[in-house]
Amino acid sequence: MRTHDHQPVERGRVPSRGEEGPARTRAGRVNELFSRWITGSARGEAFGRWLSRTIALPQLRRLAVGEIPWAPLRAPVRERTVALITTAGVHLRGDRPFHLNGDPTFRVIPRDVRPADLAISHQAYDRADALRDINLVFPIERLRELERERVIGRLAGDHYGFGLMGSAAAQMPAMKDVARRLAESHVDLALLVPA
Amino acid sequence: MGLLAREIEAQGVTTVGLALVREVAVAARAPRFLYLHWPFGHALGEPGNVDQQRTVLHDMLSLAAAAPRPGLVIDLPYRWRRETYTPVRDWDQPSAAVLSALRLRAAG
């Protein structure tokens, strides 16, 4: 496979509310067909679930060991700072796209980002719907609403995007880095959304 | 993603994750997971369905506040494309979906 460091981006199609939508980084024709099959058909979805289990379960048996960490909320959500983490390959349009076969890095996404400022680099799901409505994998607009409505105390300044996980061990330093950044910026609650 | 939740929670930050593959969520032994039997790339639902997206977020915030112990994977009851979503009435109250799932766990 080629690397995808400097792939050109295409426009997302049918952006919501007449605005320009997020960008679709190029994934190749075969990958696009595969991701559509995995997302859009019963047999494809079953295969996708099987693949996810096959890749993830052995790694989790090795790495998800010991006591489960526990940090309960110390005040109601309306007094807490909330951050969003997505593993669906979302990043700023101007940032380096994720490697499609697995990427051990993360990208910072600022709180006031517009859908048109974003791009999705991921090959394991059909991005068509998420490109029309980024909130399906990165509900930043919904959380800004909830902040305005005072349902949550504050929306954090920085949010985080990861690409396809692949090797969890390789990704561990990035995970620890993001965890440290969240704690240092006094985030109380992190919401995690998968691909 | 479960490993990421574990790292974040170990730094003292509460986490709630959405999961689309149940066995993977269970094996991750993460603090709090909500499971949805929905297609990949659609963790918050269908494009443009704001009530659906807000319902899922309400469930996430509810589990953040109400989970009694670590390691729960809560099944949300919503069928893909076969539900009608209404606006969340009271954000200060935990969602019915999360509350009833937690009660079931406590009873079982």
Image (spheres, grey):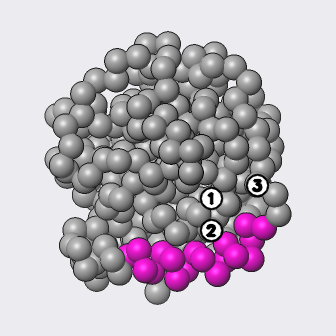
Give the residue at x 34% y 23%. B88
**Between B9 and A21, the one nearer to me in the picture:** B9
Q: Amino acid at mark 1?
A: Gly
Question: Which numbered tag is attached to residue B27?
Answer: 2
Give the residue at x 31% y 47%. B78
Cα–Cα span, label 1 and label 3: 11 Å
A111 vs A156, left or right, is left
Question: Which numbered tag is attached to residue B81?
Answer: none
Cα–Cα span, label 3 and label 2: 11 Å
Q: Secondary structure at mark 3?
A: loop
Cα–Cα span, label 1 and label 2: 9 Å
Query: At which x and y percent is residue B32?
Result: 61, 47
- State which region is magenta: A48-65
* Tag nearer the camera, 1 or 2: 2
Q: Amino acid at mark 2?
A: Ala
Tell me: residue A106, above or below residue B107: below
Give the residue at x 64% y 34%. A189
Tell me: residue A4, above or below residue A192: below
A184 vs A4, left or right, is right
Residue wearing tag 3: A68
Task: Give the crowd class for mark 3: few <14, some 14-19, many >=20 residues within 10 Å.
Answer: some
- Can residue A75 be seen here? yes
* Tag nearer the camera, 1 or 3: 3
Query: At which x and y percent is residue B18?
Result: 49, 50
Which chain letter goes with mark 3? Answer: A
Which chain letter goes with mark 2? Answer: B
Question: Which numbered tag is attached to residue B2?
Answer: 1
Examine the image and state in which quarter residue B87 appears.
top left
Q: Amino acid at mark 3?
A: Ile
A41 vs A186, left or right, is left
Decide which of tag 1 and tag 2 comes sooner along the chain.
Answer: 1
